[in-house]
Amino acid sequence: MNRRILFIVVAVAVVAVTFLLWKAKPKPKSVEEAPKDPNVVELSDTAQRNGGVAVSAVGERSIHRTVRATGIVAPDQARVGHVFPLARGIVEKVDVQLGQRVTKGQPLVRYDNIELGQVIGEYLKLRGELDKQAAQEQVAKKNLDRAQSLIEVQAIPEREFDLRKAEYQQAVAGLESQRADSARVEEQLHRFGLEDTDIRALSSPTHEVHRTASHSVLRAPLSGIVTKFDVSTGEVVEKDKELFTIVDTSTVWVLADLYENDLGAVKTGGYAQILVPSYPGEVFKGKIDYISDFLDPASRTAKVRCVVTNPDGRLKLEMFASVEVPSAASVTALAVPAGAIQKVDADDVVFVRKDATHFEKRVVELGQRADDWVEIRKGVKKSEAVVTAGSFYLKSSLLREEIGEE
């Protein structure tokens, strides 16, 4: 009986050890269990049709060099109006607000021009004296004419005639001097914005005119946007204080920083493409009209100014911009359509077809861009089949698989 139990125990032990050794023995991996390449995307023919996937062979192409620089949208300084009061005065009414679009000649602010009131008073005084002097000149002229008639018949001595002649010449000189003083003050009135009709009205029988004429209106010197506003009702303003700045943004500048090595490829009079993040894929055309004659010693860059028409005001002041300047120089290099390039993490990648249903993600080094083509310096070889349409679909499939594995 004991032998039988011992035999059973030994048999069970042998079976257990054999099972454990079998479990511990490494098994050959099947084809299905082989690790999958994380850089390869598998797409069936149906999925490729749905994603619009198309491929073409990588080939050489003549690529014109494109100079790139970053910049900022700025006002055209020839289209900036700085508005100052014509003289010291008290603000009565402000007609515009900061950021408002105004037209040329539109009232900006109304104020009591203290200095203008003083000039008007001086002008009226001079006009009175001028009228008085003109009357004296007429009297002297009549006395001279009468003396001329009497001297001809020897009714008066010649000494009397000479006296009348001297009086007339003195009256004429006084009248001319008075006219010169009146013209000087009248010119000051013109500088304050008064027209000839306004000045004539000052001497009209309506005695209240001179009291209202000193109330001046500052008007917009050009059409544009009020970008600076520094005035309030009741404030006493001096003629050296800037009240408004008005910018016409129908034409703007794009000021870019061009590296020293790229200066030889950019010429004044040439054209540049302007791109801004606010309008992806849209290109604005600008003309290069200035390249700085000196470099910034810290950045080793020179300022380049591009003039860009902006009739609809879509380019806003202080926007960041990218400036691309096509160069006449060209290179022959491997190139793919721009649509083949995708961004995965921080890498530029393309998808290379390995077989009918498998596509490999390939990190590439980009070179020059020309129109819709991009130079590939590293990452692909000539004649390899690269996805040129539907690459974003492959990128999405790749990311989905990575997320699924995680």
Image (cartoon, grey):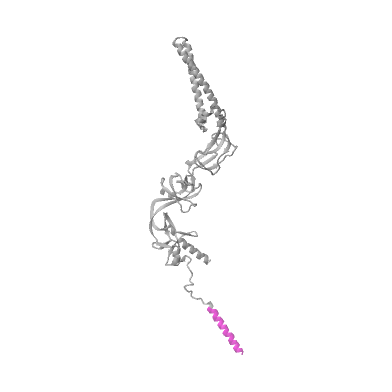
Q: Residue at x 58, y 38 (%)?
A: 93
Q: Residue at x 46, y 15 (%)?
A: 145
Q: Position of residue 316 (x, y in %)?
A: 50, 47
Within the image, what quadrant is residue 57 found in? bottom left
Q: Position of residue 314 (x, y in %)?
A: 49, 48
238 inside magenta stretch: no
Residues in magenta?
1-22
SS majority, magenta? helix
Q: Residue furthest front?
A: 205
Question: Which part of the image, by quadrant, shows the N terminus?
Answer: bottom right
In depth, the one of 397 and 333 nearer the eye is 397
Q: Is residue 249 left or right of residue 1?
A: left
Within the image, what quadrant is residue 91 found in? top right
Q: Position of residue 312 (x, y in %)?
A: 48, 47
- Using the rendered image of the protein, determine whether residue 241 is visible from the camera's viewpoint: no
- Using the rendered image of the protein, determine whether residue 112 is visible from the camera's viewpoint: yes
| Residue 337, placed above or below residue 319 | below
In depth, the one of 170 and 201 nearer the eye is 201
| Residue 5, placed above or below residue 385 | below
Q: Position of residue 393 (x, y in %)?
A: 47, 62
| Residue 93, placed above or below residue 303 | above
7 inside magenta stretch: yes
Q: Residue at x 54, y 80 (%)?
A: 19
How many numbered marks have been drawn onto this rendered protein structure? 0
Q: Residue furthest right?
A: 2
